Image: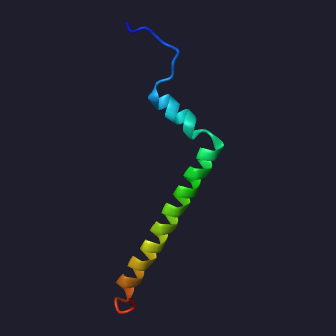
Amino acid sequence: MAACDDQPNLVEKIIFKLGEPENQARLLQVAWRISLLMMILGFIIILKTVSPNIM
């Protein structure tokens, strides 16, 4: 049986780091930009499918 140590491992350190408010704000900004880009690309694909002569 392995000995239990109290030092956090790499995954726990990353989760604790992502839990900080400034990192959560940065993640929210990135997620918002990705979702906006996906929405724009989907809109372009729909427009090109419906009427290919627009662009």
Residue 38 picture location, percent across and down: 45, 67
Comparing 23 with 39, the one in front is 23
Residue 10 picture location, percent across and down: 45, 29
Comparing 22 with 33, the one in front is 22
Q: Is residue 8 above or below residue 20?
A: above
| Residue at 56%, 36% in the rendered image | 17
Q: Specify the quadrant that holds the C terminus.
A: bottom left
Q: How is the image coloured?
A: rainbow
- Seen as rendered, the residue at the extreme bottom is 53
| Residue at 60%, 38% in the rendered image | 19
How many marks can you see? 0
Q: Specify the quadrant that holds the N terminus.
A: top left
Q: Is residue 31 above or below residue 22?
A: below
Residue 54 picture location, percent across and down: 40, 91
29 left or right, relative to 34:
right
Q: Is residue 21 above or below residue 33?
A: above
Residue 37 picture location, percent across and down: 47, 68
| Residue at 60%, 46% in the rendered image | 24
Q: Is residue 13 above or below residue 2?
A: below
| Residue at 52%, 56% in the rendered image | 31
14 left or right, relative to 23:
left
- Seen as rendered, the residue at the extreme right is 21
